[in-house]
């Protein structure tokens, strides 16, 4: 059985889609949910009875990453899925877990890297954006791309954001599922 951890910082809509996908596949155990800060996604995971932890980023990134390592080893975690995780993992952490960390990013990378991809796209004159799933490397939003889906510009920013979230929820699990059972 494969066990994955999911790292979040916010609403956790991507995490919910991942949790649902895992629950329907007997090859996967219930995930470990890790949050960089208190957030609605963490509350939801606790309500579901999932194993959760709040990473101690308030004590510094080094302390938080040491705890992340410890939890992954103790929980026999094979891979880490970043799902709206608003912290950048250190190059040392990424190297220790080479090939074992995936991220979802709301743009067609390499376009619109960074933490403001949706507003950066909206402010541009590009006609379409999309969603990317990639392997995390030391280069921010720069690792090998596993899958991408385009999302066209919509009439309003809110509609565009909603279309991105729907595309994210559909794309992440099948890609992670195939990657960690390859
Ligand atoms: C998603 O759009 C993700 O791609 C981005 O942050 C958002 C997180 O949403 N990096 P949620 O916490 O999964 O609802």
Image (cartoon, rainbow, N blue to C red):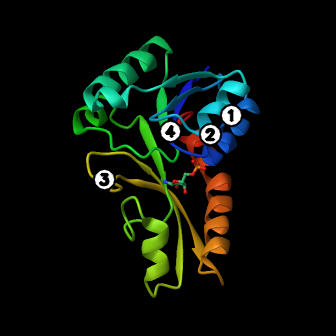
Q: Position of residue 162 (x, y in %)?
A: 67, 65
Q: Earlier in the sequence, mark 4 or mark 2?
A: 2
Q: Looking at this view, is 15 or 102 the one in front?
A: 15
Frontmost of labels 3 and 2 is 2
Per the model, the C-alpha gap separating discs 1 and 3 is: 28 Å
The residue to which callout 1 is attached is 44
| Residue 113 figure quarter | bottom left
Q: Position of residue 47 (x, y in %)?
A: 72, 26
Residue at the extreme left of the image, as rendered? 92
Please say if 116 is above or below 99: below
The local secondary structure at tag 3 comes to: loop
Per the model, the C-alpha gap separating discs 2 and 1 is: 6 Å
Q: Is residue 27 visible?
A: no
The residue to which callout 4 is attached is 81
Q: Earlier in the sequence, mark 1 or mark 3?
A: 1
Q: Earlier in the sequence, mark 3 or mark 2?
A: 2
Crowdedness of circle 2 by 10 Å Cα count: few (<14), some, many (20+)? Answer: some
From the viewer's perspective, is 30 left or right of 103? right
Which quadrant would the N terminus be assigned to in this image? top right
Per the model, the C-alpha gap separating discs 4 and 3 is: 15 Å
Q: Position of residue 107 (x, y in %)?
A: 48, 66
Evaluate if marks 3 and 2 touch, with contact meaning CB atoms under 8 Å apart. Answer: no
Evaluate if marks 4 and 3 touch, with contact meaning CB atoms under 8 Å apart. Answer: no
Crowdedness of circle 4 by 10 Å Cα count: few (<14), some, many (20+)? Answer: many
Residue at the extreme bottom of the image, as rendered? 125
The residue to which callout 2 is attached is 40
Frontmost of labels 4 and 1 is 1
Per the model, the C-alpha gap separating discs 4 and 1 is: 17 Å
The residue to which callout 3 is attached is 140
From the viewer's perspective, is 141 left or right of 33? left
């Amino acid at each position: 059985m494969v066990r994955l951890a999911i790292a979040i910082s916010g609403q956790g809509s991507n995490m919910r889609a991942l949790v649902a996908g895992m629950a329907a596949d007997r090859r996967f155990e219930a995930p470990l949910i890790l949050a960089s800060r208190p957030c609605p996604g963490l509350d939801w995971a606790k309500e579901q009875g999932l194993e959760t932890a709040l990473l101690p980023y308030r004590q510094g990134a080094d302390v938080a990453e040491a705890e992340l390592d410890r939890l992954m080893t103790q929980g026999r975690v094979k891979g880490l899925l970043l799902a709206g995780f608003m912290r950048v993992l250190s190059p040392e952490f990424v190297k220790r877990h080479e090939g074992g960390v995936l991220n979802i990013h709301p743009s067609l990378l390499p376009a619109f890297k960074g933490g403001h991809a949706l507003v950066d796209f909206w402010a541009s004159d590009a006609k379409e954006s999309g969603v990317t799933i990639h392997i995390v490397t030391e280069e921010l939003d720069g690792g090998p791309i596993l899958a991408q889906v385009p999302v066209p510009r919509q009439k309003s920013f809110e509609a565009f954001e909603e279309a991105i979230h729907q595309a994210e929820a559909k794309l992440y699990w099948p890609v992670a599922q195939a990657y960690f059972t390859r």
